[in-house]
Amino acid sequence: MILLTTLYLVRHGETEWNASSKVQGNIDTELNEKGLLQAELVAARLAEENIDALYTSSLKRARATAQKISEHTKIEVKELHEFREICLGPWEGLTLNEINERYSEHYRIYRESPSDFNMPGAETFLEVTERFCNAINNVIAQNTGKKIVIVSHGAAIKAAIISVLGIDMRHYNKFRIDNGSITILNFSDKYQGGVIVDCFNNTCHMKLK
């Protein structure tokens, strides 16, 4: 018998900073009207999955999304600081164009060689990956064989997926995680490598509405 632990990685709904291409990082922004609708739709989708456990980043945009999921699934939300977004220090609050103008060399490294990104005041991709994946391992250890939802953030989710799958971090910018999306990973010792991607960046629950 194969014992699967299923992980649903959910990116929070949209914020005004998402809509205006501002970097958020650890800035505690809130969902906008579209983001609240996305949270409602992803919650309705997950209500079909018989979820056993629900975790969230401690940032407001993730917590608000997780709360909608909790209302639909009747599962208590547990906050973990480790599921917060990557901290990007002086970039937070700036648009990508502003970052490119003011921090052109660091931004080039971020885009072309993320594993070498090391800017004063910001987390490295190694740091965000280690804290996120360690938290995933702990959550799975506490919920083996169950269905687990984690509500988090775009960069943190991408970095964790790339690490779990053993992909070189240089490919980070070839992946996309949309607001309100669901990525499903199945963990089992029966599989080579221990993990299977069931779906990636799924937003069908929003497009059908």
Image: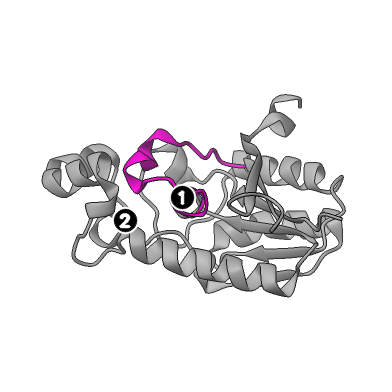
Q: Amino acid at mark 2?
A: Glu
Q: What range of the chain is rendered magenta? A: 158-180
Measured as percent of width and height from the top left, residue 180 is found at 62, 42
Residue that appears at 82% across and 63% down: 52
* Image quadrant in which you'd find residue 128: bottom left
Q: Of the two numbered discs 2 and 1 on the same chain, state the one appearing first in sequence.
A: 2
> Marks 2/1: CA distance?
29 Å
- Seen from the viewer's position, the closer of residues 195 and 92 is 195
Measured as percent of width and height from the top left, residue 154 is found at 48, 48
Secondary structure at numbered mark 1: loop
Q: Badge 1: few (under 14), some or many (20 or more) residues near its Cα, within 10 Å?
A: few
Q: Nearer the viewer, mark 2 or mark 1?
A: 1
Badge 2 vs badge 1, beta-carbon distance below 8 Å: no
- Seen from the viewer's position, the closer of residues 164 and 117 is 164
| Image position of 138 with respect to 38: above or below | below
Q: Disc 2 designates what residue?
A: 92
- 166 falls in the magenta region: yes
Q: Badge 2: few (under 14), some or many (20 or more) residues near its Cα, within 10 Å?
A: some
Secondary structure at numbered mark 2: loop
Residue that appears at 56% across and 62% down: 60
Q: Disc 1 designates what residue?
A: 166
* Image quadrant in which you'd find residue 179: top right
